[in-house]
Image (cartoon, rainbow, N blue to C red):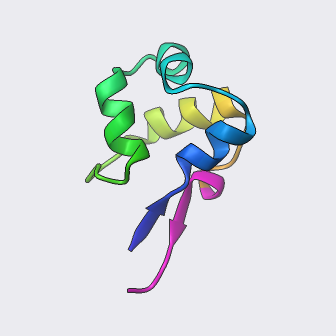
Amino acid sequence: MIIVNLDVIMAQRKMSLNELSEKVGITLSNLSILKTGKAKTIRFSTLEKICEVLKCQPGDILQYRED
């Protein structure tokens, strides 16, 4: 199972969902779906932009956990 820790990284960076949405260039609803872990896919270009804006690594956002 893939765990999305986007909310943790955003809290550490003191960044709101609205602010991240604007800086990354994706809709608030799509970012919310990703943040809640309900997304089925993510483009590498989107992940790259999120990492650029939050100054983090993909592994900071995505975590694998066995069921």
Quarter of the figure that contains the C terminus: bottom left
Q: Position of residue 54 (x, y in %)?
A: 67, 33
Q: Is 61 one of the magenta-colored residues?
A: yes
Span highlighted in magenta in the image: 59-67
Give the farthest residue toward the top: 22
Q: Position of residue 63 (x, y in %)?
A: 54, 66
Quarter of the figure that contains the N terminus: bottom left
Identify which residue is drawn at 50% across, 26% down.
17
Q: Quadrant of the rendered structure where residue 19 is?
A: top right
Identify which residue is drawn at 63% across, 37% down.
10
Q: Position of residue 37 (x, y in %)?
A: 37, 54
Image: 65 above or below 43: below
Image: 45 above or below 57: above
Identify which residue is drawn at 54% across, 23% down.
20
Image: 26 above or below 38: above
Identify which residue is drawn at 48% across, 18% down.
18
Q: Is 63 one of the magenta-colored residues?
A: yes
Q: Is residue 53 left or right of residue 66?
A: right
Q: Count up the numbered dots.
A: 0
Q: Position of residue 66 (x, y in %)?
A: 44, 85
